[in-house]
Image: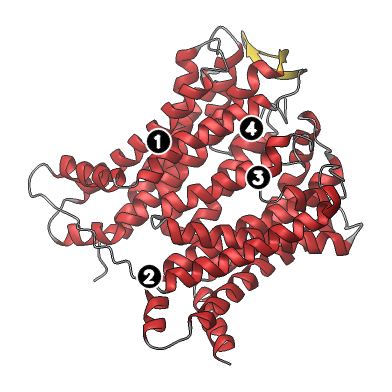
């Protein structure tokens, strides 16, 4: 009875934020419906099975990501309350069971949405296998979310780490790339994916793909139980002071923001590790073949054949840049929101406060850009490096401002999901030259279109021919900056 009551209370707490439940349903639907086709094309290009196999796997991927993020934020939000309940006499086993059951319910909601979307889009040829595989995805990533929730307190670090693990698992797993690469066999859902899409691995031994998949799910459940039990018995109290200054408010605000960011050692490591792994592994798995890109020369659109291994790294870098910049903008504003209200009450000028926050966001976006370009330069040679760097910076600043806007609108859980979804669909899918020789007409209205066209122009042509796209990029920056200023004024000024 106690466990069931706790589960109801935990779910009620989650339901108090309607946008969270809305996103838990909509993100899998959008991911399966919108991204399944392009990802199947990418898989065929990179040597994977492609077609219905990849589209089936998207249901598991969507459920996995939602489950990990939901479990991570559930752990962090309830960390102090859980310890208080244990101190008040609640058996840790009941608390752990309630937390896992709550995470499982949220994961089941995401899985059900993804499966319904998959059924409406392509149908499900083997329902038992697909449903069981999707549930195993969710169970494994519940444990990953719980483990990261215990080890990583800062939401920027935790979110990027979840995204990092998920990207490695999806884009270098057997559904996207070749299934026989030994290095990918350690990925969490390697065997689950193979069994779910009915692609025998021939390297699972006597236990078989299903046996290894069930083993991963059982071990993940045990790990989740262990880490939640451990955190409910461990008291960790952190007090963070927010120093202020009466003079030099912009400089003081920047120093405070950088000092807070400097304490996040995991964030600094991930800002370097994500581009390194994402770009280099993408290049390592690129097949030796050519592809066609649409470029502009002397005012005319021309189809140009390029060697895929030469350009793939240069087209993957902006995806890492956009994702990291969006998360940096989102959490910089969210983490400072309560402190900003206190500073405003203490007399800190609103313009100075806004300038200092945007300066910190800009520096983090530039750091993500620099790390990505340093790695990209080792495997890619742009025709116009100066313009290529400019386009990368424009992508970083644009999506950092998108993150600033997303945070106050959607909160942490919903904001993280939107921050993942928007750059992925924009830069990773619709603007991707690997999937579209030229972006579709509707994608011209997305923020990544302008800098994306400038980046491709800089990558493969010797002169600047995308002046209109460059001006469009600057227009997006101006509009997003103005919108961020309006949003900041609404959130930083205390309610009267």
Q: CA distance from mark 1 to mark 2?
A: 35 Å
Quadrant of res 345: bottom left
Residue 375: % across, % down: 50, 24
Q: CA distance from mark 2 to mark 3?
A: 31 Å
Q: Nearer the viewer, mark 4 or mark 3?
A: 3
Q: CA distance from mark 3 to mark 1?
A: 25 Å
Q: Nearer the viewer, mark 3 or mark 1?
A: 3
Write the residue at 74% across / 55% down: 59
Residue 321: % across, % down: 49, 34
Residue 406: % across, % down: 46, 52
The answer to which of marks 1 and 4 sits earlier in the sequence is: 1
The residue that mark 2 highlights is 234
> Residue placed farthest to the right in the image?
125
Disc assigned to residue 233: none
Quadrant of res 334: bottom left
The answer to which of marks 1 and 2 sits earlier in the sequence is: 2
- Disc 4 secondary structure class: loop
Contact? badges 4 and 3 (CB < 8 Å): no
Q: Quadrant of the C terminus?
A: bottom left
Q: Nearer the viewer, mark 1 or mark 2?
A: 2
Disc assigned to residue 169: 3
On screen, residue 334 above or below 95: above
Q: CA distance from mark 2 to mark 4?
A: 47 Å
The residue that mark 1 highlights is 365
């Amino acid at each position: 009875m106690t466990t069931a009551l706790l589960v109801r209370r935990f779910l009620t707490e989650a339901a108090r934020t309607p946008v969270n439940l809305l996103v838990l349903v909509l993100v899998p639907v959008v991911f399966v419906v919108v991204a399944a086709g392009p990802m199947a094309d990418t898989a065929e290009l990179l040597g994977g099975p492609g077609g219905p196999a990849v589209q089936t796997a998207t249901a598991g991927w969507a459920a996995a990501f939602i489950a990990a993020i939901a479990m991570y934020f559930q752990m962090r939000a309830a960390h102090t309350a859980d310890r208080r309940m244990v101190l008040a006499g609640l058996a840790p086993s009941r608390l752990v069971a309630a937390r896992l059951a709550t995470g499982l319910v949220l994961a089941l909601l995401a899985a059900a949405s993804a499966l319904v979307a998959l059924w409406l889009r392509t149908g499900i040829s083997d329902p038992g296998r697909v449903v069981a595989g999707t549930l195993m995805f969710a169970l494994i990533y519940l444990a990953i979310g719980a483990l990261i929730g215990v080890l990583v307190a800062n939401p920027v670090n935790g979110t990027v780490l979840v995204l990092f693990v998920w990207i490695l698992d999806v884009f270098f797993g057997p559904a996207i790339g070749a299934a026989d690469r030994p290095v990918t066999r350690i990925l969490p859902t390697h065997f689950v994916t193979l069994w779910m899409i009915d692609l025998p691995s021939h390297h699972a031994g006597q236990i078989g793909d299903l046996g290894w998949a069930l083993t991963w799910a059982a071990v993940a459940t045990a790990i989740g139980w262990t880490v939640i039990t451990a955190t409910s018995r461990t008291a960790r109290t952190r007090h963070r002071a927010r120093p202020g200054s009466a003079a030099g408010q912009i400089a003081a605000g920047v120093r405070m923001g950088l000092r807070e960011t400097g304490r996040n050692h995991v964030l600094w490591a991930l800002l370097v590790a994500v581009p390194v792994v994402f770009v280099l592994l993408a290049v390592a798995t690129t097949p030796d073949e050519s592809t066609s890109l649409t470029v502009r020369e002397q005012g005319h659109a021309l189809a140009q054949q390029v060697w895929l291994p030469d350009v793939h790294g240069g087209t993957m870098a902006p995806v890492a840049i956009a994702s990291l910049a969006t998360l940096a903008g989102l959490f910089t504003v969210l983490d400072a929101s309560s402190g900003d209200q206190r500073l405003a009450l203490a007399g800190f000028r609103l313009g100075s406060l806004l300038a200092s926050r945007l300066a910190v966001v800009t520096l983090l976006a530039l750091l993500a850009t620099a790390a990505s370009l340093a790695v990209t330069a080792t495997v890619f040679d742009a025709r116009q490096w100066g313009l290529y760097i400019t386009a990368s910076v424009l992508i970083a600043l644009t999506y950092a401002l998108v993150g600033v806007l997303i945070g106050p609108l959607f909160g942490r859980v919903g904001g993280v999901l939107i921050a993942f979804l928007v750059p992925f669909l924009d830069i990773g899918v619709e603007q991707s030259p690997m999937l579209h020789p030229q972006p579709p007409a509707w994608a011209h209205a997305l923020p990544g279109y302008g800098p994306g066209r400038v980046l491709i122009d800089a990558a493969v042509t010797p002169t600047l021919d995308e002046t209109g796209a460059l001006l469009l990029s600057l227009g997006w920056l101006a509009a997003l900056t103005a919108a961020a200023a309006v949003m900041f004024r609404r959130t930083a000024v205390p309610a009267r």
